[in-house]
Amino acid sequence: MQRLGSKYCRRILSSVAALSGNGPSSFRISKQSYTTVSTLPRNFNNVQKPTNPGESLKWGSLGFCRTSSFATGFTPLQRKPLESIIDIERAKNKSIEELADIWDDYHLGRGHIGVTMKATLYHLLSQRAADCRHFVIPMWKGNGYTTMFLQVQMPHMLFTGLEDYKARGTQAAPYFTASYYTEFAEGKDLVLIRGDIVFTSKLTDSEAKWLLETAQSFYLNDIRYKMVERFNKETREFEFKDVLQALDMPVL
């Protein structure tokens, strides 16, 4: 846990600038760069069942594949195919609201996050992420901050502890990853997002969801995106305290 004073903020900037090369072209992810660990017990019969019987009916209406492979970890850049999670043909017959609700509910409390966004916002996110592929996000834990280092290569986002990234670079394992599915972008203006918590000892479901929503806000909000641009293109002009203020967090 770190308390981010001005000296620490300067250290963040110099460390990340050195690792990232201070430019989007330096971002590389190797399929062999990460190690993932299964967070499920070997006996999958002990996995918590939905408390609302109606949830099973909703999931079944989309043909969700409820097999042991659902939560066995995540290999970055080798996302789980959408057709292995839901029956895409059945999903086409659902309204946007029904599909979004079912997708969100299915992932609750299972070490995964299920959210959705409009396709128009996804296209803006992709456009901006292609130009600015890194950022840092403070997350409050206990009595201080844990700083997360964000790497974006759409349709993926990877969140790694900054200290781990400083120590291991691209070999550092992500704590949390997010994959974007665009199969319904054209027909329903809807993009499905699946987040996978790789290390449940480091992040809770609620923390992971907050990280995802916060990361997206920095790319989709025009004012916040200026901070992302400065971080990637004008590192010396970047002020970490601006991020803290944007998130209504105290500068410790």
Image (tube, rainbow, N blue to C red):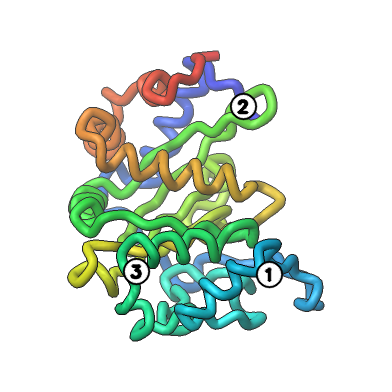
Identify which amino acid the numbered label 1 is placed on: Ser
Residue 180 at x, y percent in the picture? 36, 64
Identify which amino acid the numbered label 3 is placed on: Tyr
Dot 2 alpha-carbon crowd within 10 angstroms: few under 14, some 14 to 19, many 20 or more? some
Identify which amino acid the numbered label 2 is placed on: Gln
Nearest to N terminus: mark 1 or mark 3: 1
* Residue with the mark numbered 2: 2
The disc label shown at residue 181, or none: 3
Q: CA distance from mark 2 to mark 3?
A: 35 Å
Q: Residue at x 52, y 43 (%)?
A: 166
| Vertical comparison of 81 with 114: above or below | below
Figure quadrant of the C terminus: top right
Kind of element beneath mark 1: loop
Name which quarter of the figure residue 56 lies in.
bottom right
Is any part of residue 18 visible from this angle? no
Name which quarter of the figure residue 221 lies in.
top left
Q: Nearer the viewer, mark 1 or mark 3?
A: 3
Would you say 109 lies left or right of 30 here? Answer: right
| Vertical comparison of 238 with 195: above or below | above
The disc label shown at residue 38, or none: 1
Q: CA distance from mark 1 to mark 3?
A: 22 Å
Q: Residue at x 34, y 69 (%)?
A: 181
